[in-house]
Amino acid sequence: MHTLLIQTSPREQDSISRRLADYLTEQLSCSTLTLRDLAEDSLPTPVRQDLLALHSGSGDGSPALAGLRQLEDRLIGELMVADTLVMGIAMHNFSVPVVLKQWVDYVCRAGKTFRYSEDGPRGLTGISDAFLVTATGGAPVGGTMDFATGYMAHIAHFLGVRQVHVIDAGGSKGTPEATLARGRLQIDRLLDNHLTLAV
């Protein structure tokens, strides 16, 4: 099994989302693991003309644009070879971190990770399961102030992920160790149930 692990928190080992995503990945016992740490190795933001060229497939062949296309191909390649996706999502201002939104903008490409059909867009990744480990300071995961989890679940389904599972690590500001213990228990129960819980 090939797992792609996406980390987003800049807090390193103090991060609840990182620690739980790492724990979950260890429990999966994957044969191949690809780590994409977006906080440590942030993605460049294309300038206007390069962004338009990336979306249209055109461009002037500049070194900068060529580098962005190589990066896009690498990120999409990591996604396309994965069987399982694990994401450590640190909620920032009620939504996803900007580094994760940048990743989404790179990997959502028509003809590569999804295609248009008569019935609407169809995801092409073929990933069986995505695990979203959402950590918040106080906002309840899945509540009215959580614009991160539902968004990333939608993106995962849009890209062709068959099942999306959410690990609730909300409220980490008050009792981080209790949040970690609760998150690990959710992970253990989820994996013991043979991945039957999906959203």
Image (cartoon, rainbow, N blue to C red):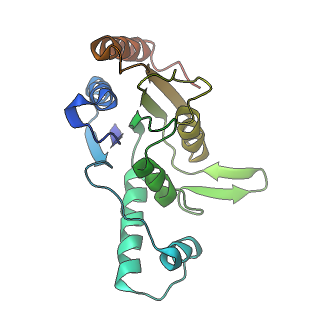
Q: Is residue 140 above or below residue 92?
A: above
Q: Nearer the viewer, residue 88 or 23?
A: 88
Question: Quarter of the image holding residue 62?
Answer: bottom left
Question: Quarter of the image holding residue 25?
Answer: top left
Q: Is residue 148 left or right of residue 86?
A: right
Q: Is residue 64 above or below residue 150?
A: below
> x, y percentage for residue 152?
53, 39
Q: Nearer the viewer, residue 93 or 18?
A: 93
Residue that lies at the very extreme toward the left in this rendered image:
13
Q: Residue at x 55, y 61 (%)?
A: 109
Q: Nearer the viewer, residue 142 or 186?
A: 142
Q: Is residue 120 above or below residue 195?
A: below
Q: Residue at x 36, y 20 (%)?
A: 172
> x, y percentage for residue 24?
32, 25
User: Could you tell me which quadrant the C terminus lies in?
Assistant: top right
Q: Residue at x 34, y 83 (%)?
A: 63
> x, y percentage for residue 8?
35, 42
Q: Is residue 185 left or right of residue 47?
A: left
Q: Is residue 91 above or below residue 143?
A: below
Q: Is residue 117 left or right of residue 160?
A: right
Q: Residue at x 45, y 12 (%)?
A: 193
